[in-house]
Amino acid sequence: MGEPISWRTDLEIDPVIEAYKQHVDRSLIRENLRRSVEERFQRFIELRGFAVELRRAGRAGDRHVKRAAGRPKDLEAIAEFEAIREGQRRSQASRARFASTMER
């Protein structure tokens, strides 16, 4: 039997890894590693916020398409979603009012 892969000392080039490396922009990896941990974390938070905004925009588009289709099932889903959002808005407003009274 041959040696386990982990003990191989020859430096054969793996064609699968080489194929993947063609499509990886390693300059982005190097650029990111030059940043401090705090900078990388801040960048992550910014990208996460961007992802949330994209998701929100997609949902708005979905509601527009569903409303245009006019299927009863879709209209029910839109009404349910809007009720949930309204409840969330009221809850946020209530928390904001409470927080402002605590600051006084």
Image (spheres, rainbow, N blue to C red):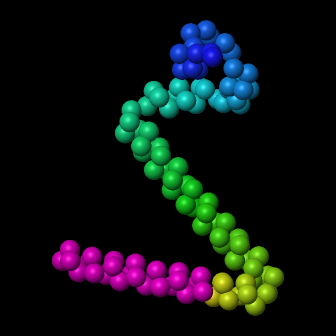
Main secondary structure along the magenta-highlighted residues: helix
Q: Locate the C terminus and report the quarter of the image it occupies.
A: bottom left
Q: Residue at x 53, y 83 (%)?
A: 84
Q: Residue furthest left?
A: 104
| Quadrant in the rendering for residue 63 | bottom right
Residue 23 percent across, percent down from the top left: 71, 31
Q: Locate the N terminus and report the quarter of the image it occupies.
A: top right
Q: Is residue 32 above or below residue 104?
A: above
Q: Is residue 43 above or below residue 7?
A: below
Residue 6 percent across, percent down from the top left: 54, 20
Q: Is residue 60 above or below residue 79?
A: above
Is 48 displayed left or right of 54 in the figure?
A: left
Q: Residue at x 56, y 9 (%)?
A: 9
Magenta includes 91? yes
Query: Toward the viewer: 97 or 36?
Result: 36
Magenta includes 15? no
Is 71 displayed left or right of 17 in the figure?
A: right
Residue 74 percent across, percent down from the top left: 73, 84
| Quadrant in the rendering for residue 28 | top right
| Region rendered in magenta | 80-104
| Quadrant in the rendering for residue 42 | top left
Residue 20 visible from this viewpoint: yes
Q: Residue at x 47, y 85 (%)?
A: 87
Residue 22 visible from this viewpoint: no
Q: Residue furthest top?
A: 10
Counting labels gives 0
Q: Residue furthest right?
A: 69
